[in-house]
Image (tube, rainbow, N blue to C red):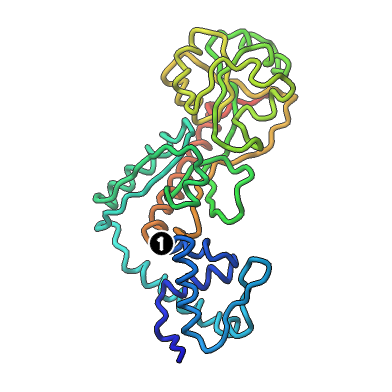
């Protein structure tokens, strides 16, 4: 005889994910289950119900009317469980290691704002900045808790939080020929100079910060150095006419350490607003420790936006044409 009193909170989370996605493997990721274990788990859970709760159609599982009648109660139990876990979580006692991945040069700016908050409020926690060839896959597969990445063509099932606008600028050495041009820069002025190009590990839809500026040249025709971290080239840029397109926060770092300066992008280039975001998977979304850590990133984002506002008021922020 079926006995739904045997259902655990994890069982209900599993069912809720099957309801949402129709894919057992996706539901299994919530519990760190393999494909075969997900199938066995689903069979076990279904055996507790007196009627079928899902039907398979064209490779996906769809809820039956019987399950839809139970759905409000299942969600109510999950919400109560989540609220209880939140109240029980104590940052001061957690020993959690949070894994962050990002190839962005300016990730150090984010960490310098988030890490002190974490150490102050959760002195036993750890933050691990890890390198992955594919940051999105690392988050989706549970190898990383978070990634900081540009919000371009991200999968809809990933959660995201806006951190800061990309604010692309042109980085060159001081007294570079481009700094001597009177009036606004034009795209054709840039195209004759060799450059440093950033590798992002993303698909062809977003190849790097210089996206769209050099689309008519032969592949990497003017790229003399490609890297996932701009700072490895800043010293060479100080002594050459190499140029690079990067975000403003990376440019801030470069200008503090080397004789470099930032210029606005060409006035004839139509810039579309892009944001760098914190992303995480649905499997981590309800974890109280994870939610707490996301709150620290949100605090930093608010503080950084205020910092940028003050810089702009003083004329020291992102360079713009008058």
Residue at image point 44% right, 41% down: 101
How crowded pointer 1 is (Cα within 10 Å; few <14, some 14-19, many 20+) is rated as some
> Can you say which quadrant of the picture contains the C terminus?
top right
Query: Looking at this view, is 317 or 268 the one in front?
Result: 268
Is residue 87 rendered to the left or right of residue 179? Answer: left
Q: Is residue 84 above or below residue 139?
A: below
Give residue 74's position: percent from left, percent from top: 50, 79
> Can you say which quadrant of the picture contains the N terminus?
bottom left
The residue labelled by disc 1 is 287
Query: Looking at this view, is 119 or 24 the one in front?
Result: 24
Give residue 236's position: percent from left, percent from top: 47, 12
Query: Looking at this view, is 261 or 60 the one in front?
Result: 60
Is residue 27 rendered to the left or right of residue 217? Answer: left
Residue at image point 41% right, 86% down: 5
Q: Is residue 51 above or below residue 179?
A: below
Q: Is residue 275 above or below residue 185?
A: below
Circle 1: element type: loop
Residue at image point 42% right, 71% down: 10
Give residue 25's position: percent from left, percent from top: 52, 62
Res 172 quadrant in image: top right
Residue at image point 50% right, 85% down: 49
Residue at the bottom extreme? Answer: 1
Res 264 quadrant in image: top right
């Amino acid at each position: 005889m079926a006995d739904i009193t045997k259902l655990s909170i994890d069982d209900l989370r599993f069912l809720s994910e099957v309801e949402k996605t129709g894919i057992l493997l996706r539901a299994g990721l919530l519990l760190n289950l393999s494909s075969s274990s997900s199938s066995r788990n689903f069979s076990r859970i279904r055996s507790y119900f007196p009627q079928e709760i899902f039907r398979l159609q064209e490779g996906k599982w769809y809820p039956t009317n019987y399950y839809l009648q139970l759905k409000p109660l299942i969600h109510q139990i999950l919400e109560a469980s989540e609220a209880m876990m939140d109240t029980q979580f104590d940052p001061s006692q957690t020993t959690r290691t949070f894994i962050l991945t990002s190839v962005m040069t300016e990730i150090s700016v984010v960490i310098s704002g988030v890490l002190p908050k974490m150490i102050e409020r959760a002195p036993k926690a750890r933050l691990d900045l890890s390198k992955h060839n594919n940051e999105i896959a690392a988050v989706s597969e549970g190898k990383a808790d978070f990634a900081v990445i540009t919000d371009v063509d991200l999968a809809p099932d990933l959660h995201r939080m806006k951190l800061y606008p990309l604010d692309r600028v042109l980085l060159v050495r001081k007294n570079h020929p481009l700094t001597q041009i009177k009036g606004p820069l034009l795209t054709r002025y840039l195209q004759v100079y060799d450059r440093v190009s950033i590798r992002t590990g993303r698909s062809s839809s977003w190849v790097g910060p210089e996206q769209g500026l050099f689309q008519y040249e032969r592949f990497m025709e003017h790229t003399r150095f490609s890297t996932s971290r701009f700072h490895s080239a800043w010293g060479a840029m100080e002594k050459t006419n190499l140029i690079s397109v990067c975000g403003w926060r990376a440019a801030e770092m470069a200008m503090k350490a080397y004789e470099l300066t930032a210029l606005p992008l060409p006035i004839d280039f139509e810039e579309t607003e892009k944001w760098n975001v914190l992303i995480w998977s649905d499997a981590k979304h309800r974890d109280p420790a994870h939610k707490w850590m996301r709150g620290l990133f949100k605090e930093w984002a608010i503080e950084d936006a205020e910092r940028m506002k003050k810089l702009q008021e003083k004329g020291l922020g992102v360079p713009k044409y008058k």
